[in-house]
Image: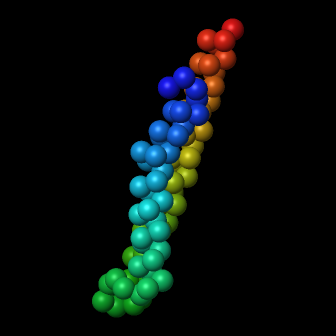
Amino acid sequence: MNSPLDAILIVFIVIGIPIICVTLIVLAKILKGSGSGSNASGNAEDLKILTELNRNLNRMEERIEALETIIIERQKSKNS
């Protein structure tokens, strides 16, 4: 882990890819129409899940940006 990109890549692999996969699976289920018994309650449930996923992805993006900043600052201080 000599460069900041290594750490970013590891964070993306460990956290990002599973979240993206889950999001795609949920979207596929919504588009396919499988899910809850009644359509209206199923759509409301799906919307709630997607909203929560979106909120969590935004929080994860903020955390990754903070980690990137920390790593870059550490690299700058090492090089100085």
Residue 19 appears in the picture as rendered? yes
Which residue extends farthest left? 37
Q: Nearer the viewer, residue 40 or 61?
A: 61
Question: Splitting the image into 4 quarters, where does residue 38 fall?
Answer: bottom left
Q: Residue 80: x percent and y percent?
A: 69, 8
Would you say 27 lies left or right of 38 here? Answer: right
Which residue extends farthest top? 80
Q: Residue 68: x percent and y percent?
A: 59, 33
Question: Splitting the image into 4 quarters, where does residue 71 fall?
Answer: top right
Which residue extends farthest bottom? 38
Q: Residue drawn at (45%, 77%), measured in percent from left and top?
A: 28
Q: Nearer the viewer, residue 1 or 24?
A: 1
Q: Residue drawn at (32%, 84%), measured in percent from left and top?
A: 36
Give the vertical position of 79 relative to 70 (above or below).
above
Q: Residue 67: x percent and y percent?
A: 55, 33
Question: Splitting the image into 4 quarters, where does residue 39 fall?
Answer: bottom left
Q: Residue 21: x percent and y percent?
A: 44, 62
Q: Residue drawn at (50%, 45%), measured in percent from left and top?
A: 12
Residue 52 appears in the picture as rendered? no
Give the vertical position of 37 relative to 61 (above or below).
below
Q: Residue drawn at (46%, 46%), measured in percent from left and top?
A: 13
Which residue extends farthest right? 80
